[in-house]
Image (cartoon, helix red, strand yellow):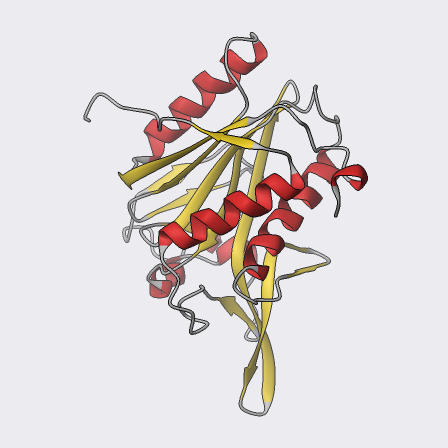
């Protein structure tokens, strides 16, 4: 997708921030709520914030109680994003995307499609062919397993809008503990030929810094330029 083909591309730079360490989920949500309010008031720039969370599960607005298989394994947080249960934890790069679609284009379908192009472009930096599937949210990769084939999810998408300003976003599995996904039915998908994977699980020795750089480069190709910004700070820091 070129800039001219994507109505969500904008020339105004987006603040790009990367947090060190593990950020508590409630603190991240509180910051997003505050920042999108500031964007709507014209007091803050658009922002993409990359981070890692401690191990936890989130329940989106469509989450079903039966999809939480292990209720005591990790903390469970309700989430305003769309979708069902998902896992966040160390080794997974979460990108919270706060864009003003009032200044781009008020089209949620095209926005989600642009997120997919963004992830697929980043995976392409590592020669991975990311794909989307009708009826399944996120980005998938095909796997060959002996005499059969399967598809594994490598990136999740969950979004929310307030007055056409986006928040929540995407998560890319770089090197998380994949066994942690077994405590839930990820995104409500429970089929023997569908699973979860990561860059390292695919045999690629990719670190978090390399993954962040690939996401940044692909983001600029899809949404427009970025400028580096300080990461949010919290009282405990």
Q: Is residue 119 above or below residue 111?
A: below
| Quadrant position of residue 129 | bottom right
Q: Is residue 43 above or below residue 114?
A: above
- The answer to whether any part of residue 62 appears in the image is no
- The answer to whether any part of residue 225 appears in the image is yes
Q: Is residue 92 above or below residue 193?
A: above
Compare residues 120 and 11 and report the one nearer the observer: 11
Q: Position of residue 12 (x, y in %)?
A: 62, 23
For image coordinates 75% across by 31% down, the residue present is: 107
For image coordinates 55% across by 46% down, the residue present is: 217
Q: Position of residue 122 (x, y in %)?
A: 56, 54
Q: Position of residue 141 (x, y in %)?
A: 58, 67
For image coordinates 35% across by 28% down, the residue present is: 231
| Quadrant position of residue 144 | bottom right
What is the quadrant of the C terminus in the image? top left
Q: Position of residue 232 (x, y in %)?
A: 34, 25
Compare residues 10 and 64 and report the one nearer the observer: 10
Q: Is residue 153 left or right of residue 75?
A: right
Q: Is residue 137 left or right of residue 21?
A: right
């Amino acid at each position: 997708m070129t800039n001219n083909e994507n109505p969500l591309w904008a020339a105004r730079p987006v603040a790009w921030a990367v947090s060190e360490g593990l950020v508590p989920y409630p603190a991240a949500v509180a910051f997003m709520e505050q920042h999108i309010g500031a964007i709507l008031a014209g007091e803050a720039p658009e922002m993409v914030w990359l981070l890692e969370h401690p191990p936890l599960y989130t329940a989106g607005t469509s989450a079903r109680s039966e999809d939480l298989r292990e209720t005591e394994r990790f903390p469970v947080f309700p989430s305003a994003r769309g979708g069902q249960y998902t896992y966040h934890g160390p080794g997974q790069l979460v990108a919270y995307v706060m864009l003003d679609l009032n200044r781009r284009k008020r089209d949620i379908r095209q926005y989600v499609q642009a997120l997919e192009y963004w992830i697929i472009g980043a995976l392409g930096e590592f020669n991975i062919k990311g794909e989307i599937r009708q009826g399944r949210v996120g980005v998938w990769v095909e796997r060959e397993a002996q005499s059969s084939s399967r598809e594994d999810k490598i990136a999740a998408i969950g979004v929310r809008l307030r007055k056409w300003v986006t928040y929540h976003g995407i998560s890319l599995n770089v090197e998380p503990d994949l066994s942690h996904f077994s405590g839930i039915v990820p995104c409500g998908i429970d089929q023997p030929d569908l699973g979860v994977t990561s860059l390292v699980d695919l045999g690629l020795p990719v670190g978090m810094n390399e993954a962040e750089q690939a996401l940044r480069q692909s983001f600029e190709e899809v949404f427009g330029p970025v400028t580096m910004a300080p990461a949010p700070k919290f009282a405990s820091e």
